Image (cartoon, rainbow, N blue to C red):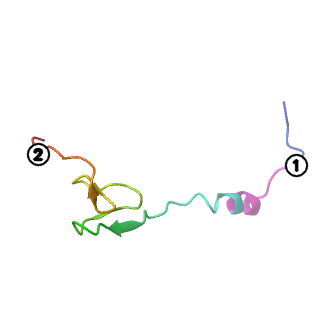
Amino acid sequence: MAVQKSRKSRSRRDMRRSHHRMEIAELSVDATTGEKHRRHHMTKDGFYRGRQLFKVSQDA
């Protein structure tokens, strides 16, 4: 089993963790409906890149 030779400082630990922050998801606007959605995801109405992929049922 590997054992570290020396302890890492707080500075080096925090520099490694600097990329672990939360990021806000990018939003796009659908050309057909004008609805905002996450990039590379479909809208709640079932549209993606201006085409309707499937009908969404309204019974929920």
Q: Secondary structure at mark 1?
A: loop
Look at 59% across and 57% down and name the residue there: 20
Q: Which residue is mark 2?
A: 58
Q: Secondary structure at mark 2?
A: loop
Total label count? 2
At label 2, which amino acid type do we have? Gln
Residue 8 magenta: yes
List x then y, in percent, for residue 30: 29, 66
- Dividing the picture into quarters, in which one does residue 25 lie? bottom left
Answer few, some or many: residues within 10 Å of disc 2's Cα (few below 14, many 20 plus, some between 14 and 19): few
Q: Which residue is mark 1?
A: 6
Q: Please, is residue 24 above or below residue 4 in the view?
A: below
- Dividing the picture into quarters, in which one does residue 43 lie? bottom left
Image quadrant where one finds the N terminus: top right
Span shown in magenta:
6-14
Frontmost residue, 5 versus 42: 42
Q: Nearer the viewer, mark 1 or mark 2?
A: 2
- Dividing the picture into quarters, in which one does residue 38 lie? bottom left
Marks 1 and 2, Cα distance to the nearest angstrom?
Answer: 61 Å
Farthest residue in the left direction? 59
List x then y, in percent, for residue 28: 36, 68
Answer few, some or many: residues within 10 Å of disc 1's Cα (few below 14, many 20 plus, some between 14 and 19): few
Look at 24% across and 67% down and name the residue there: 32
- Of label 1 and label 2, which has the lower sequence position? 1
The answer to whether residue 16 is left or right of residue 22 is: right
